Amino acid sequence: MDTVEDLKFLEESTAKKYNPKFGDREYLVIQTYPLGKTVRVIYRSYSYQDAENKCSLENMAHDYSTFTTRIFHDGKLWIPGNISGIPYKISEQQFWDIHPDYKSTDIDGEIEICNCSYLYFQGRNNILTCLKDDDGRNITVCPNCGEILIEDEEDDDFTPSACRGCTNYHGDFYGDNQLICAIYPYGWSDDNCPDFLSE
């Protein structure tokens, strides 16, 4: 028995949203911000001008989302040339396929998204590629855009929160050990030190 939901697919614009097959040289308006684990296609057309017009309208209509026009060619997304609409250069945004091993819920880590839309697996101690055609490789920079993925964890400010602004604070290092103050050499464990003296 047909329902109202089934009949929605008779409308061409609705059916195109759910059809994952794109034709060669088909123009796609995609959402570039905020990023998701899949590329969100909001409009498809074989006319470059129609796609550009739709992209402009979407950018004007949304305050917190951005959209751009891409062309699907040879199985990849390309940036179209400004006037001609022919494939100009390969896009950083692509349809990334996650390897099935990383989709399970019992793995220790999560799939992260780089600023260029590249997906990678962030484990406890390492960062791995997690795509069907490239998985399990240790990486420190994004293979797609070259952005550094490992955050610098060094913190130059070793002042405990209870000691900020206190005249008793010393803070110098002696070998590998830091002397916080003469009263509490290892620092006070709470946010409110009983011997706090303001400067």
Image (cartoon, grey):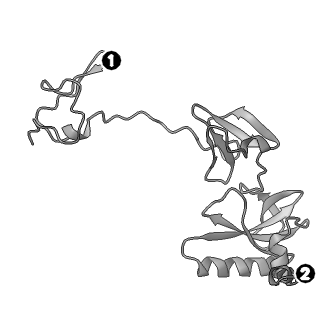
Secondary structure under the numbered disc 2 in the rendered image: loop
Q: Is residue 191 left or right of 136 when viewed as pictured?
A: left
Q: Which residue is mark 2?
A: 1
Give the amino acid at mark 1: Asp
Dot 1 alpha-carbon crowd within 10 angstroms: few under 14, some 14 to 19, many 20 or more: few
| 37 lies left or right of 163 | right
Percent across and percent down for residue 180 are 21, 27
Q: Nearer the viewer, residue 107 or 138?
A: 107
Disc 1 to disc 2, how far (Cα)? 74 Å
Asked where in the image residue 63 lies, by quadrant, the reply is bottom right
Callout 1: helix, strand or loop?
Answer: loop
Residue at (19%, 37%) from the top-left corner?
163
Question: Which quadrant of the figure contains the N terminus?
Answer: bottom right
Query: In the picture, residue 153 is in which quadrant?
Result: top left
The residue under the point 24% across, 34% down is: 189
- Residue 85 seen in this snapshot: no
Q: Where in the figure is residue 3, as x and y percent of width and height?
A: 84, 82
Cβ atoms under marks 1 and 2 closer than 8 Å: no
Q: Is residue 84 above or below residue 114?
A: below
Q: Is residue 40 above or below residue 117?
A: below
x then y, percent, for residue 43: 77, 75
User: Disc 1 marks which residue?
Assistant: 176
Q: Nearer the viewer, residue 93 or 78?
A: 93
Q: Which mark identifies residue 88? A: none
For the image, the number of numbered tags is 2
Q: Amino acid at mark 2?
A: Met
- As drawn, is 186 to the left or to the right of 101? left
Looking at the image, which residue sits at the far top? 175
Quadrant in which the C terminus appears: top left
Circle nearer the N terminus (1, 2): 2
